[in-house]
Amino acid sequence: MSTFFDTRFTQIHSQILSENMMYQLSACHSLQESFDFFETQGPDFLNPLIPELKRDQAVLDRIVTLTGLDGYPRLQVEACVLCAFLADKRVNLPLDRFIRRWISCLICALTTTEDIKLLQHVITALGNFVHIKEEYRDYAFREGIVSELLAVNLTYKKNIAISQALAYTFSSLCAHCSRFQEIHHSLIFLSEALFTDDLTTITHAVEAISQICKHHSKEVIKENEDIVPRLIELLQNHSLSIVYPSIKAIGYILHHGNAVLQHLMDFNLLPSLLRLIDYPNKEVQNETLWVISNISTGRHAQIQLLIEAQVIPKLISLLKCWEKRERVDREIFKESAWILVDVLSNGTEGQVQYMLKQHVLESFCEVLQHHAKIGDVEALKIVLEGFQRILLREGLEFRSQFSRILDDYHIRSILQELMNEEEHSHSIVELATNIALWTS
């Protein structure tokens, strides 16, 4: 640490270990102010006080002791807040022994604390505690945390710092919580928070809604019909931390039933998906393709929506990028390839003819040529499976066209090589043999 912080920590150490409660309160307040300062330096900044505290067991023990001073509520609350911050930084504390006391103290402080800065810390501290363990979160639910947080929101609706802290703690409460009855009242705050102008509040709110949608998307839509169009609108945001949970939430909504698809389309989902296919983050790309795959496996009308939105050429371009090793990782290639296979398998004759005009078979042939050379089994299997599904379809008169394309790209010789059981897996050999027979 710098000389300044050496001196500061020495002073804090002395005050907190004294028997004077005013000194102890001052030390707790100084520690929290220091933590707040370092938090503003960014997530990668190493707080120099944390290593010092980890080595100073006497100070840690005293902070824990102060959380039990029932006759001195301000000091008790400040100490509980510090414990929550330290626990979040993985400082070793007797959590299982005291967590119920600390959570109860902080929930009580939600209704008694008039200092806005301390109230913000109390709310955040609860968020820190509840995301550590499921049993801590369950205890907070039993203590009525949701109703108390909502009461705070009613009192301080226009305070941005309080809204940010509330959104963070609601996000922590909703993470991995599968029981809707415990979190559904959270939507009262979260649906409002989605429409604020503050990016930090929106970020935590959309993360919370994404977590809820994982198990309860139907209930979310029923609770507030404005949430879905807002999620689609947020896909246009420039922040990854907003776009990613938004597309995940939409994926969960579609995954739990296509009945809501038309509702999503009414709010121009597809143009956003088309843009996100090229998003400079592979997690967003993967989630976007997952959403598109849920659409492509549906009715002919859903496939037609993808065609009209010009999604198919974009997916084919991903195949070409993969073949050239440009910008596209394995998972993105696999997902885009399977979507194209699904459309070829499930589309109408007219839709398949559209795909052929987009040179989808030629693109698959190029991928097969490339990956046969390097022995990429997974890529080979996807392409061969796609060829087989197309050939198994009845009523489509394009086998002669298919055979011509195979000849143009010298695929028959590749199929002969893939039929060698000594070099390739049984599934590859079987697929190559079937395609060779059906196109002979």
Image (spheres, rainbow, N blue to C red):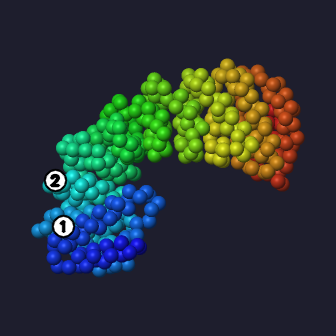
Q: Disc 1 designates what residue?
A: 75
Residue 383 position within the rendered picture, expressed as x and y whole percent measured from the top left: 73, 39
Residue lying at 36% horizontally and 72% vertically, measured from the top left: 4
Residue 421 visible in the current orientation: yes
Residue 352 position within the rendered picture, expressed as x and y whole percent measured from the top left: 69, 24
Q: Residues within 10 Å of mark 2 (few under 14, many from 20)?
A: few
Q: Earlier in the sequence, mark 1 or mark 2?
A: 1
User: In screen coordinates, is 38 left or right of 13?
Assistant: right
Q: Residues within 10 Å of mark 1 (few under 14, many from 20)?
A: many
Q: Amino acid at mark 2?
A: Glu
Residue lying at 20% horizontally and 79% vertically, measured from the top left: 18
Tag on residue 269?
Answer: none
Which quadrant is home to the C terminus? top right
Residue lying at 34% horizontally and 50% vertically, measured from the top left: 168
User: In screen coordinates, is 286 left or right of 43?
Assistant: right
Residue 381 visible in the current orientation: no
Residue 271 position within the rendered picture, expressed as x and y whole percent measured from the top left: 54, 28
How many angstroms separate mark 1 from mark 2 (CA)? 14 Å
